[in-house]
Image (spheres, rainbow, N blue to C red):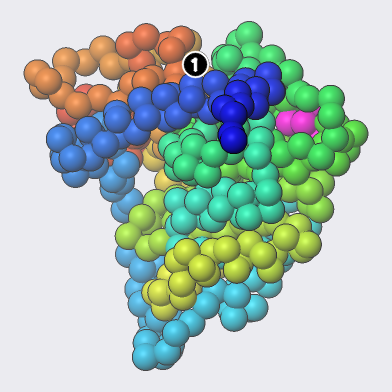
Amino acid sequence: MTTDRPAPRRSEASQHRDMVLAEQSERTASLNEHYERLAFELNDGDKGNFLSGWQCVNPFVSSFFANVKRRAERFDYARYTYFDEHVDLASSIIAMHAKFDVTQPQSVMCGSGTTSLLFTFVTYLQSIGTTRIYYIPPLYITLYSALDRYGIEAVPLSTEQPFEPTFALNLPKTRNNILLLTDPVWYAGISVAPAIMDEIVEWQRRTSSLVFVDGSLQYLRWDGTLSEASARLDPALTFRLICPAKQLSSHGYRFSYILLPQSHNRRMIWAYTNIFGPACVDSIAFGHEAVAAISNRRIPQELMSLASTRHAYLRENRIIESELTPHCGYFVFERIRAPLPEGYVKVDGKFFDQKNYPDHIKINLLSPSMKLISSSASEMGQP
């Protein structure tokens, strides 16, 4: 004889986690809906060429591209090859950061672009049993999506973003946490303030917590300085993602790398290889030439001179306006006062989980469509 038994009651903690994950999934779905509509219904906003887009005009790379192609000819295209086989590339990256930064990184892992490395990192978190991370908004859409896909609870430490005047951190007091942040906030062209980063440095020392920094647009300050506050973080507890393709505005090549603790290197590489497989020979050739070009600084400095000159011209002529003060990269987040064609596609705050700057849109200062808001490219620093 059997009797029906009531189902065991789930703990309040379990119910709370389910509620948090449901809210997280809803927010991620909303963000993905915006990007998916942009991609499929709006043709990437004129194939990425629009003012809020990601396509760039870079007049400084012709000889650099020729160098990449010459180097690629030395490789055997018939063989599989992997980034970690190219120890000379890893060594050159570490040497470059030993020159640029306060602290030398322990190791480096290369990959074919930022998106692949972001997804690899979250896959690695899942593989080591991570169920919760903390983050400082905003994160790039790939991180939101990957965290949601793996059911990892993502807890924001602020309702505001680091460039907002009333931003404040609420770092957890427990030990052995994982914190994700973006520096600089790419769409606004503003780095995380050194005081905020110093607070994270001290917290990391107290709690032995891992920190992941999406620094895809680092080393692109308009004043030419190379100081990055995230370089102060403990190299034994820090992952820093850097993107040479973005630094050189050479997006047809796919190459990024993560500076990471030696203790995590092998398993991270294994996670990457299981998702993305071998490397493209052209990406490896690009990596070698990109490190040399970034160390030389000529192309990044010329790009940032062009971006900052254009921004100053647009502000002085009241074509764009904002209370924000960008100082790095080639994206800014501002109002456009100049008239645009009816129905023109814009990427506004809803794409970045940003609700506090109405009428602001992301503007690419290297966009092929820059002439829409200025009649004279030469006045904006165009060579």
Is 157 placed above or below 309 here? above
- Image spot of residue 256 (x, y percent): 51, 58
Regarding residue 199, the answer to whether it shows in the image is yes
Under mark 1, the amino acid is Leu
> What residue lies at 52% left-to-right and 69% top-to-bottom?
273
Residue farthest left in this picture:
342
Of residue 322 and residue 180, the one placed in the foreground of this image is: 180
Residue 103, percent from left and from top: 80, 52
Q: Which residues are magenta?
A: 197-201
- Can you say whether 339 is above or below 374 in the image? above
Q: Is residue 315 left or right of residue 153?
A: left
Front in this rendered view, residue 342 or 328? 342
Residue 306 vertical placement versus 272 (above, below): above
Does residue 198 belong to the magenta stretch?
yes
Q: Residue 113: percent from the left, percent from the top?
A: 45, 57
Residue 321 x/y as whole percent: 37, 13
Q: Which residue is mark 1?
A: 324
Res. 62 image quadrant: bottom left
Q: Is residue 285 visible?
A: no
Per the image, label 1 sits on a secondary structure element best described as loop
